Each structure stands twice: as structure tokens, then as C-alpha cells.
Amino acid sequence: MSFLIAEVIVDVSTYHVDRPFDYQVPSEWVSVIELGCRVKVPFGPRNVLGFIVGLKKETDVPLTKLKSITQILDMEPVLTEELLQMAKWLKNNTICYEIDALQVMLPSALRAKYEKMIKLQKAQNLPEEVQLIFGKRQQVNFKEFERADLLPLLKQLVAENVVTIENVVKQQGNVKEIRMVKITEDQQLIEQAIEQSSRAAKQRLLLQWMCQHLGEVRPPQQICEETGVSLSVLEAVIDKGAAQFVQEEVFRDPFTKDVSRTHALQLTDEQQVALQALTTAMEQQLAQTFLLHGVTGSGKTEVYLQAIQKVLDEGKDAIMLVPEIALTPQMTERFRSRFGEMVAVMHSGLSVGEKYDEWRKIQQGKVRVVVGARSAIFAPFTNIGLIILDEEHESTYKQEDSPRYHARDVAIWRSEFYKCPIILGSATPALESFARAKKGVYTLLSLKQRALHQALPTVFIADMREELRHGNRSMFSESLIEAIRVRLEKNEQMVLFLNRRGYSSFVLCRDCGTVVQCPNCDISLTYHRTTEKLKCHYCGYEEHVPQICPQCQSDHIRYFGTGTQKVEEELFKLFPEARVLRMDVDTTKHKGAHEEILEAFGAGLADILLGTQMIAKGLDFPNITLVGVLSADTSLHLPDYRAAERTFQLLTQVSGRAGRHDKPGEVIIQTYTPEHYAIELAKTQEYEPFYEREMFLRRRSSYPPYYFVALVQLSHEDVMMAAEYAGRVADWLRGNLSHQVSIIGPTTASIARLQNRYRYQCLIKYKIEPNLIPVLQRLLAMYRAEWIKQGILMTVDLDPSTI
């Protein structure tokens, strides 16, 4: 007798089970089971979810010990063979569990939800309180016993085999169905019903209408409106057999408004050259990576749109990634207006059901283009012709949890699989990307002119030290106040940018100098004026604002620093007539908030858009003529080797929001360090001189892109334990890696305590180290076998976005 054996990766994230397990496929399922399907399998004492990653005829496991799959969850595989291969690559290249790599590729609706159910075995002589819980049901949720405080009794019933406890694997996402009316195809049936309804005029009218629409499926409301009858009349006709109610599956619609169709624009010479290079790579099926470096407003999006059109003409699919959820509505709108119903959208702002439906549209081939944030890189297309990463320099493309992948690396892997090109687009590319383009690893395409040949905005640097010397203690320089006043008079719009939400960055006692800190993290609490609370932006802790100092009992409590709420309040004082929209994490919590704010601003319902970094890029409104950066120093003085690069990128991007159409733009950057090269060069949007200057400093300090870095971080509730194990890690790495590798540390992390855990880290710098991944895997094996039992938490990041 021949068996079919399935190799299954089970939904258990532990070191000892990070491999496929063999299960027998029941004979009745042999013809339907496929690679990439989800199944339920017995694992230890419970049922768990698993993914089929292999099928074979033989196994080394004795047949007496071989367990069978208990349920198939998918008739169609949820993961393609390509994605199964990619999971193995992710497991190795990000050092994660294979189950984590498989799960990250699916919408949350398809991830398992485990519930304990109590199943009744013997209904006789049940205790009264247990009878009340079960009622007429055969099984109930474990939580019902928990709520009734009957766990000791439950334990006794399990021992007596009166009830059993089972783990049930449930799926979170459900298919959405609506009630429809299906008219019979049998005209004779309707004619008989007409004869029976001789006295009911409305029913006769409806039945005569149905004669003209045999076999059609319509919503009940539509039938009632079209025929002028009530729902009760329709139900009476259905009772006579002329039609029936049916459930029909529908996709949830994540789009809030209709868009009008647009057509391809006339390209500039530079855009045409870029598009031709991309077209050639597509025709020759080359897995080529292009870096599209274009100044802000140079028309990169139009190049993307026309390149995708060529992909669609060839019958292939395209993935378009954007870094911020705030950009997704505007970008999606542009894509939908060009490609209509062929566009799906994937980002964290959608509900679980909407994400599930968008994913299913892609899987079923109902759409050809996906626009989304980082996770959209795993869209289950099977014929990809082009992948685009817009604003490729953004750190949001890096996942901070396991698996710690970078969307760019996944995109390159997929491009090699499908033999298709990638576009990395940015006005301020990451230094690593530009260095690769210089070396010929990537192909550089440049757009040096704005698409409509407008001049770049004029940039003025406001030295806040001079403002202080002249007695101006406001958060606005005189030049910015005057510029805002002029724009309000002209009915033009402006963007004010501050990379800090809240009201003040910290609360300080002026007598003893105490700054109110988070009790769980080494970070000051941020004051939020609307709720009159202090909040930690790392662990979520919040408390009421103290009236007196917790240390010295003084009432000289003052608020220092500037947040978006405080700026909004100051604007109302200075310009009471100004209509201000604030866009930060606090104002965009509810679903669709990003779209609402941007739509209101685009419709001219506000004069000033005030926000954090979510407004710094991608926005394109014709009436914006002024951009004000309230503090260029916020990101400049962070303890991070990328601080200057990120400041330059942010200032260039936010400056590019002004004067993108026919009105000239102006940018005012307020700073206490106007002489810094990142600020000076952002003023003129000179990327290459900045690149040369920054590369010189990186070479001198042995940082990327001249070296690769990897970060090992440990944490524990006891500071001495965290320090001791970090020391062990550093010593072990020095003993097992080659002498060309530099180990820095152990040192405390930039935020030394987070959520009551002390954090230490070791930084590995290397140029070429073939042993790095095997050595780190051995280190993780040691940690998982022993150290984890001591309460140590350790993470390894092979490409950290911050150190």
C-alpha cells in the first residue's frame, strides 16, 4: 500500500521544532492536498496549524509512530512554491524560525487563533452549575468555566472523563456574504404563481417583472425599488417558489471614493531615457536593479505608472511599495485613476477583513497591481514583471520584529526568481544604494530637472541663535511668521513640519532639575495637552501631570521642548484666522484618518497642515507655496551614525512639498546649527556633494557602506544579569569570528531600559566574514538551550536600522 507523506512546518516558534515534521496524508485527501496548503495536525497533546512544505512517498519515521493530518484548511494553496523557497532563504538570511517567515507572508486573517473548548462526553448526573454552563450545547469555551470560577471542578470532570479539553484552531478572517434573490429559470413556475395571486395586485406585478428576468440574481432592495413593491410582497412571492434567497460572496471595498480616469502624460527627455532603460530590461527579462535618482517633483511617479502599463501590456503583474501609510491613499488614488479595478491596496490601516479580501483578490488573479507598505512585497502574484520601492531610503522598509527582513532584499530575491527589473526611487537615496550604483551593482537613472521645469523652492535658513539674541523666545522665527502672514493673505497653503508629537518633549522641575521619567523605560515622558497626561511613546505608560515635583515637592513645574500640539496652540494665538489641520500619530488613530485629513487639505478646507514625518514626503498639492521646518536639529543630534544622512533626507523631502506646480515655493528651515553640512547642502538639494562628504566620514569611522554591521542585543530585568551575559556574548564572538571582524561592546543600548528590562548590546563590524551566519546560529542555539531559562532575551539583527 503506497502512502503519501506531507512535510509540515508547525506553528510553534521554538528552536527544537524549527524543521519539517512528517505526517501521513489520509487516502481520501491524497488527490487534493498541495504544497503551500495550511493543515491542522496533532502535535504533542494538542492540534496546531501547519504549512505543507514538501510531499513524498517515503519516510524514516516508523509507520506505527506516524500521525495523520486531521484537517485541510485550504483547497487552494495559500503560499506558492516561490514563497516556500523564499521562506527558507529568509530563515537563513535573517536568522529566524521558518514558521515566522511563513506567517509574515500571510494576512493576519489567515494566521491561527487557538481556543480551548470543553467537550461533553457524559451528560448524565452533571453538577447543576455545569449543566447551567452547557445548557443544550455539546461544547463550550474554556473561558466560560474560568469566568464562573469552576476550574477545580473542571479538573475533576476531566479526570473522570465526563468532559475533554480540546484545542481548536480557528481562522480570524471570514468571507463576507450578502443576501441576494435568485429568480427561478422555470417560467411555468412563475405563471402558476401568477394564477394563484389573482387577488394580490402587487404580487402579480412583481411576478410579471420576474418573467422578464428569469435566472437573474439581484439584491432584494434593488428588486423592491425597481418594481415599487415592499419587502413583504417579495417574501410572499418567494414562498410561492418563484425565487429564493441565496448568499453571495462579496469583497470588502477599502476605497472610500471613486476616482476619474487619467491618461499617460507627455514624458520629459530624462523620463523617456529612464523608461527606455526599464523597458529594455523587461523585454530582455533581466533581474536588473535600477536606482531612479530624481529631484523632488521630477516626475518619478509618472515613470512608475508608464513602466507598469508596459508590464500589464505583457500580461504580467507589478508590486509598488510606499514607505508610509500616509502616502498610500494618495498613491493608490493615482494608480486607480490610471489602472482602474486592477489595483489592490495593502497596508496596516485596513481592517482584518479588508486585508484578507485584498489578499484574496491578488491570489485569485482578480487584480494585477498591488500598492502597499512593506508587507505588500509578499503579494502572492505568480507572474511578476516589475517591483518598485518608492522613497527607497526610508527606514520603514526594515521590519523590526522577527523575521527582521528589509523589503529591498526581498524585492531583489523575487526579481531574480521572476527575471524582472526593480526600481528603487528616491530624491535622497540611501548611501548604500548610491554607492552600489556608483560601483555598477545597480544601474543609475537620473532625473535632474523637475517635470514641469519649475524652479526648486528657494530655501532660507533661520538661525534660531540670532532670534534668541534679538529677544525672540517664540518657537517661530520672524521670517517664518512673516511668510505665514503673506500666505494667509494670498489664500495659499503651507506645511509646517516638526518631528515630535505631543505638547512638550519633557516636564521639568525648575527647583531641583528633576525630569519626569517613565517608570519602565529610561526616557522622559511626553506631555499631551488634550488629555492632560504624560505618556511614554515606547511602552505606552501614562500618568496625570504632577502639580508638584515628585522629588522636592516644589510647584515650579515647567514644560520644555516643543510638540505638535503646542505648535498648534501657538498658531491659534498668532493667527486666529488660520485654519490648521494637525497630522500625527495622535490625530490619525482611527481608520481612514490619513485620507480624511489629506482630502480636507486638498479641498482647501485648511490653510496650514502641521505634522510629523508622515507629511514629509510624497504629498503633492498645487497650492502649497511655503514649507516651514520648525526644528532641523531634532534628528541631527541623535546618537546614530546615520543622523546626518536622515536629517539631509528629511529636509530635502519636506522642502520638495513646496512649489510643485505653477506657483513658486519657499522653504524656511529653523535651526540652532545652520553651519552643519547636512543643513547647508539640504538648502540647495545637492545630493552628490552631501554623498561625498558623508562617505568620507563613514570611511574614516569604518561604518556602512564601507563595512557591514550586525547587532546582538540582550535584555534582562536585572541590570547585572544583562551586563554579564552581554559580556559573555562579546567574548564568545571574539573567540569564534576571524580577526578581521571588529566587536564593539558590550555597551548599554541608546535607551538603556525599556519596559523594565535593562538592555546591552554588541556591535559586529565586518567586510567579509563567511562564518558570520553559522557563528550567530550557534550563538542563538546556546541562548535558546540555556540562557533563555535565566530570563535573558536576545535578538540578532544582521542589518540594523538604528544602533
Image (tube, helix red, strand yellow):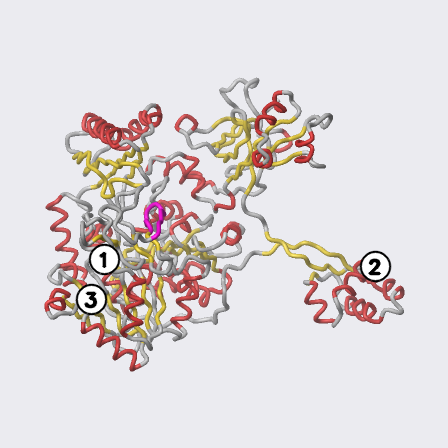
Q: Is the magenta stretch mostly helix, strand or loop?
A: loop
Residue 719 sits in quarter: top left
The residue tagged 3 is 669
Residue 560, label in figure = 1
- Residue drawn at (23%, 36%), measured in percent from left and top? 761
The structure residue drawn at horizontal position 45% and vertical position 68%, both measured from the top left corner, is 337
Q: Marks 3/1: CA distance?
A: 21 Å
Mark 2 neighbour density, 10 Å: few (under 14) some (14–19) many (20 or more): some
Local SS, label 1: strand
Considering the numbered disc 2 on the image, is that residue within a helix, a strand or a loop? loop
Q: Which mark sits nearer the N-terminus, 1 or 2?
A: 2
- Which quadrant holds the N terminus? top right
Asked if residue 14 shows in the view, the reply is yes
Quadrant of residue 658 within the rendered picture: bottom left
The amino acid marked with disc number 2 is Lys
Q: Which of marks 3 and 1 is nearer the N terminus?
A: 1
**Secondary structure beneath label 3:** strand
Q: What stretch is highlighted in magenta?
A: 535-544
Q: What residue type is labelled 3?
A: Ile
